[in-house]
Amino acid sequence: MTQQTNSAPTGDVLIKNAHLLTQDPDLGELVGDLLVRDGKIAEIGTDLSAEGATVIDGTDRAVLPGFVDTHRHTWQGAVRQTGIGWDFGAYRQHIQLTWGPEYTPEDVYVGNMVGALGALDAGITTLRDESHIQNSPAHTDEAIRALQDSGIRGVFAYGWPSIDSNKWMLRGEATHPEDIRRVREQVLTEDSARVTLQAMLRGPELSTTEVSAADLGLARDLGIRSSMHVGNGPWGPQFRGIGSLGEAGLLGDDLLFIHCCTSDDEELKMLADCGAHASVSAAIEAVLPGLGAPATGRLLKFGIRPSLSVDTEATVAGDMFNVMRASLTAHNLGVSLVPDEYADLPTFTPRDLLEFATIAGAKASGLDDRTGSLTVGKDADLIVFRLDEFTTVPSADIAASIVGAGHPGNVETVLVAGKAAKWNGRLTHPDLDAIRAQAEKSRDRLLATPLVEG
Ligand SMILES: [Zn+2]
């Protein structure tokens, strides 16, 4: 066996004596070994050996499935953190009205690339890229190419153009771009590939119920899953995204509902009854005024195990540690500030949050047959988390250490289908300097655009 070296392994990997937080209900948590062979989790046990495998000493390390971010507008990567403290009006003015129409295919490529690399650096191995920058087929193709080049497991959720925003948003009546058919038939044809296709639809709150029916018909005809933003601030009670789909007989377990902040109880029950999924973007919901409170506790009340998501790096950090902590902070703030609304809601623990950030995300993305847990036979999408650094030592409870104090710097190694995207604390992508320079150029050009009045 070869001991761990500074250069990333090209073959099999054996992790020895690590704390395995498997997220597999049959295995739970154990101290043991995990063998990665041919990109898959081949064995989990004790005293494993493997001829020729690179060995990772798992002492003082936790190993868990890579995080799954179920909703991120990754194209905004090069303008990350430009809008800390924005309200929705400022977000709309900068992103949707000013920068979106200015994006070139090159901007989309580098935005997606830095977004995906940042995600990998933070231990996110699966990214559902909610891509509403389909300004031309070239924009679409570059978004997909970046996901493929980055090394991440990607779901490209095909949205709408970021030009002529009033046509597409705020009850716009245009139906979903037909170009999604081209992508399905010519670009992302294989559902077993590392990057696959889904649809990001506007749903009844951003378009209308009639448009949503047509859009869902298209996605289902193409055999792909769909997501929609619902429970968006005041539009939730006004247009009732989940409720209107339910009344139209359109709900199904192929749907992922994002936010759900102001969806009412009847709607959450409908969501649960049809086996659909939910994505809580707790960090952005907590900082963007008017979106509504994260629905974590309310979803749990109806038996829904939510997934978690970053949403946009323009206004929040791109790692899941921040989202997990925001879920807990927002919930407990609710208990303090509006006890009448929160008193009867279920609470949740660091272990629950790790489940939401991993296997629940894989289920919400329709990928739980290949990722989201340390299970023999699944693809080896996993992270090695250091517990011996002085932000976490001495750890009394590993899940609590990861959720309570974890940050991307603790993520030492990241494998996606057994391939090292991060090794010994460093991303392995060969073109990091060139990507950095390209991202700075894109940022400078976009930020120089005069703001468009709404
Ligand atoms: Zn979003």
Image (spheres, rainbow, N blue to C red):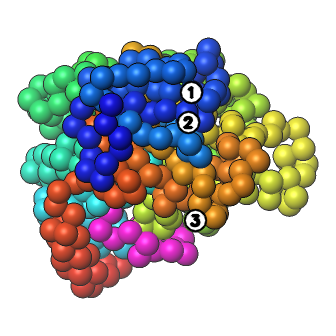
Picture disc at residue 32:
1
The answer to the question of whether label 2 and label 1 lie on touching residues, with beta carbons closer than 8 A, is: yes
Q: Residues within 10 Å of mark 2 (few under 14, many from 20)?
A: many
As measured in the structure, the alpha-carbon distance from the residue carrying label 3 to the one carrying label 2 is 39 Å
Task: Please say if the residues under marks 3 and 2 sit with CB atoms less than 8 Å apart.
Answer: no
**In the depicted view, which residue is nearer to us: 306 or 120?**
120
Pointers 3 and 1 in contact (C-beta within 8 Å): no
Residue interval drawn in magenta: 76-93
Residue 415 vertical position relative to residue 79 in the rendered view, above or below: above
Whether residue 190 is visible here, answered yes or no, is yes
Q: CA distance from mark 3 to mark 1?
A: 42 Å
Q: Which residue carries the number 2 mark?
A: 18
Q: Between residues 341 and 332, which one lies in front from this camera angle?
A: 332
* Figure quadrant of residue 267: top right
Q: Is residue 56 left or right of residue 98?
A: right
Q: Quadrant of residue 101?
A: bottom left
- Residue 79 among magenta residues: yes
- Mark 3 = which residue? 288
State the image coordinates of residue 275 (x, y, percent, origin top left): 56, 19
State left or right for residue 37 relative to residue 244.
left
> Quarter-wise, where is residue 389 in the image?
bottom right
Kind of residue at disc 1: Gly
Q: Quadrant of the N terminus?
A: top left
Q: Secondary structure at mark 1?
A: strand
Q: What residue is at 38 percent from the left and 53 percent from the top?
A: 424
Q: Tag 1 or tag 2, which sits nearer the N-term? A: 2
- Mark 2 element type: strand
Please give the name of the residue rendered at 18% of the width and 74% of the height, measured from the top-left corner.
437
Point out the tag, 3 or 1, that comes first from the N-terminus: 1
Residue at coordinates 29% horizontally, 73% vertically from top-left? Answer: 98
Q: Amino acid at mark 3?
A: Leu
